[in-house]
Amino acid sequence: MERQSEIATNLSEVKFDIETACQKYGRNSKEVNLIVVTKTWPASDVEILADLGVTDVGENRDQEAKPKHDAVKANLTWHAIGQLQTNKAKSVANWADVVHSIDRVELVKALAKAVVNRTSVLKCLIQVDLDPTPRDIRGGAQLSEVTQLADLISDTPNLEFSGLMCVAPLNLDPEPAFAQLAMKFEKITETYPFAKWMSAGMSGDYELAIKHGATHLRIGSSILGHRAIKG
Ligand SMILES: *Cc1c(COP(=O)(O)O)cnc(C)c1O
């Protein structure tokens, strides 16, 4: 019960802040969707969230997400938000409704095989790397690669190109990244009017993501606390 009330309090604070930011920046809050990132937290927390009316949860590691998905009875939309190896495509296609982290052709090809027997489409977002600092870990496609990936996803049965995603660069002002993502988003929706999702904004920067047009916020620690299990 204690955990339930802790999560309930945090959730209503975050929802209030989202509402406030929407008013401040002239956004319709119905167009701003909350995905609660449940990575490192147990299936029981996911059930609590579902009881509190949460409809969407996000996970970043297949090994953790798969058993959690199978343990949760509530009917939720599951988002795969982490970097994805091609050998995980098959497993991810079994639990995810949306993949936010498409960043290369090989991954689209692996997912194409994985979704052959799906009865519903797998929504796909292209993760864009907007970090001006070169880093070792790969965190998305370059802006120049987006069109090619979008075309490939759109041509694949059971995959649906749904929009763009970014993670703001670590330790830098997130606004330039969000502004760049918004520009690319506007461009790409001219070609793909049904690709309506802009996934941006985490616990530390979601107000600014709302300012720049985010439609899907991925919020973890502000609601669930700082990580329970290492992951
Ligand atoms: C963990 C994670 C989040 C949520 O981050 P918080 O700071 O806990 O809100 C969002 N997006 C991705 C890709 C993540 O891995």
Image (tube, grey):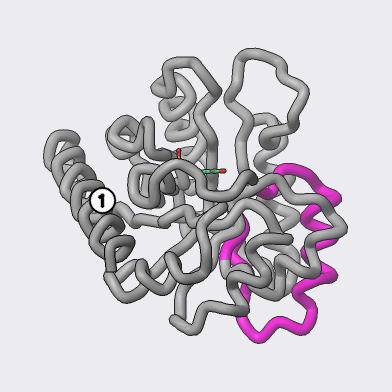
- Say whether residue 100 is visible: no
Judging by the rendered image, the residue that carries numbered circle 1 is: 10
Residue 155, percent from left and from top: 73, 63
Q: Residue furthest front?
A: 2
Q: Quadrant of residue 131?
A: top right
On the rendered image, what quadrant is the N terminus found in?
Answer: bottom left
Where is residue 58? Give x, y as percent: 52, 57
Report the residue at 30% width, 52% height from top: 32
Dot 1: what SS? helix
Residue 20 falls in image quadrant: top left
Residue found at x 63% / y 30%: 129
In this image, 99 relative to 172: left or right?
right
| Residue nearest the viewer, comparing 76 with 164 | 76
Q: Is residue 201 above or below residue 155?
A: above
Q: Is mark 1 within 8 Å of ligand 1?
A: no
Residue 1 is left or right of residue 130, and the answer is: left
Residue 101: image location, x then y, percent: 64, 48
Q: Which amino acid type corresponds to the residue marked 1 in the rendered image?
A: Asn
Relative horizontal placement of residue 92, taking residue 53 as reference (left or right): right
Residue segment shown in magenta: 98-124
Q: Quadrant of residue 165?
A: top right
Image vertical order of residue 150 relative to residue 208, above or below? below
Q: Is residue 75 above or below residue 167?
A: below
Residue sitting at x 74%, y 29%: 137
Question: Residue 199 placed where, x, y %?
Answer: 47, 46
Residue 184 visible in the current orientation: yes
Which image quarter is the C terminus in?
A: top right
Let me know if residue 95 is in the magenta part.
no
Tell whether position 119 is magenta.
yes
